[in-house]
Image (spheres, coloured by chain):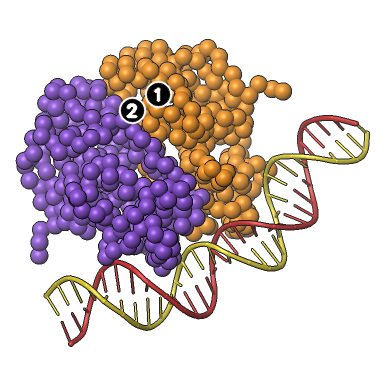
Chain colours: A orange, B purple, C red, D yellow
Amino acid sequence: MVTTKSLIPPRIPCDLCPIGRRPHFRNFTQEELGFVQSFKIGELSVDPGATVISEGERHPQLYTVLTGWGYRYKILEDGRRQILNYVLPGDLVGLQGNLMAEMMHSVEALTRLTLCTFERDKLTTLFRDHPSLAYDLTWIASREESMLDEHLLSIGRRTALERAAYLLAFLDTRAEMTGVFVEGGPNILPLTQQHVADTLGLSLVHTNKTLRKLADMGMVRWLDRGCEVLDQRRLFDLAGWRPTKEGPRPFI
Amino acid sequence: MVTTKSLIPPRIPCDLCPIGRRPHFRNFTQEELGFVQSFKIGELSVDPGATVISEGERHPQLYTVLTGWGYRYKILEDGRRQILNYVLPGDLVGLQGNLMAEMMHSVEALTRLTLCTFERDKLTTLFRDHPSLAYDLTWIASREESMLDEHLLSIGRRTALERAAYLLAFLDTRAEMTGVFVEGGPNILPLTQQHVADTLGLSLVHTNKTLRKLADMGMVRWLDRGCEVLDQRRLFDLAGWRPTKEGPRPFI
DNA sequence: CGCTCGGTTGAGGAGATTCAACGTGGGTGG
DNA sequence: CCACCCACGTTGAATCTCCTCAACCGAGCG
């Protein structure tokens, strides 16, 4: 049995953080860098399928995704599951929901996932001494909100086909922008159809038939636990959605 | 024709703010009060049905609801509308979505709505000089997120009847806690069935039939443009949901 | 008095769910 | 090494949920 979860001391110093080197991300000032470095208490690495955060628990840590894919979800008592959003490199995990109380959702890894670990208690210091980072935190929360808004619109008012088109186009553009795809390789979204179903609020069977239509139209190709987006533009048109282009975005 | 929108200079000084006097809300320190007072640039009052914020516009103001009900929504090109959440006294309006860019959603008044108006540009000052308020801002954004998470679970995975039960119980408890109901009167949620439909992601006809079932079961009573919740507990049970009790909550 | 808005109801059909079965590939244990 | 199992994708059929269309009612209002 392989370890599914391992917390190790910081290896990557923040000034060499791979995320800051990507386009689309803003860089820290020297002063910010110093604090973030002290804020960071370790690195966490989890296997695909492992749970990073579970609903109902108190989590003294916050995380920033360094590499890999994950997703946030909630379940009803009888097991019905709703995926709320996906987490990619640069995303802050554990801020959603109450700032200091117990988690209202769970987070699971889709691929091998490495995360930067921060101490929640130090948030007070962050707010007191580093207003620019505090601003960034609010900015990040705000961005998550607008994604959730769009998801709500999608599940509530788009047809099954439109929803699927929206989701795949959304994930593909996010993945592109964060640079999470393997260099040179094909752009594969590491999902099963069950994940798609639980995101779109559809049954597995109907999701399968819907994805089949998208595949027949040549917009996507479905692989074993993965989806390749072949024609982003037509997915946009079908969904009636376009990504909002953002300037350099903050992360912590 | 009555004026639907009127911006007037501040009348209510922040130290007499009616929201702070309610239970469930935290109070400002003297120091915070001074800043908030200077942050506030006026009061806005709108008629039922009037638009406070429209999607695609840039809004140099932020608002806090003083009295009344409103809702945030998005629409697709062909007019399909999704209500994202409702705004009640103490809620910050205009923070959702990008912090400084154009609004990604619209806000409309359900009842006569009065709002405190703040200058968005002064957010920088807030973050620089008032860390406790900055923390509150993030807290508020975080709270909005957990409501959206629950809505997503609801629309995605609850049945029509469960969804309706959830929505009405949710609004009823929020209204109770913010003290927006008229003193002594019956607790009326000021909605039409069209609003409920657009919140639940259902058609108007099917919403009507679903609400009828709830009424037949004695859990709610539907009035002309309003809904009275008769049995909160049974709605909770039906929806499989319970409000999270929060300590004194911040507002700005 | 006629108009509009909000709520109500019935009928027919599209869309989504559930049940059930099958294929395939990778992994595991005998 | 092979047999089995399990996870994932696929497909057909029956059923049910939900949508659209269409009509009607009552209240409020000019």
- Kind of residue indicated by mark 2: Asp
Mark 2 or mark 1, earlier in chain: 2
Q: Is residue B185 left or right of residue A122?
A: left
Residue A237 percent across, percent down from the top left: 46, 56
Residue of label 2: A136
Q: Same subunit under labels 2 and 1?
A: yes
Q: Is residue A173 above or below residue A239?
A: above
Q: Which residue is at a point 44% across and 44% down the rendered structure image?
A: B241
Residue of label 1: A252
Of residues B196 and C7, the one drawn nearer to the viewer in this rendering: C7
Q: Is residue B214 above or below residue A242?
A: below
Q: Secondary structure at mark 2?
A: helix
Q: Quadrant of the N terminus of chain B?
A: bottom left
- Kind of residue indicated by mark 1: Ile
* Residue A34 visible to the viewer: yes
Q: Residues within 10 Å of mark 1 (few under 14, many from 20)?
A: many
Q: Is residue B101 above or below residue C15?
A: above
Q: Which residue is at a point 45% across and 31% down the rendered structure image?
A: A103
Residue B85 percent across, percent down from the top left: 34, 48
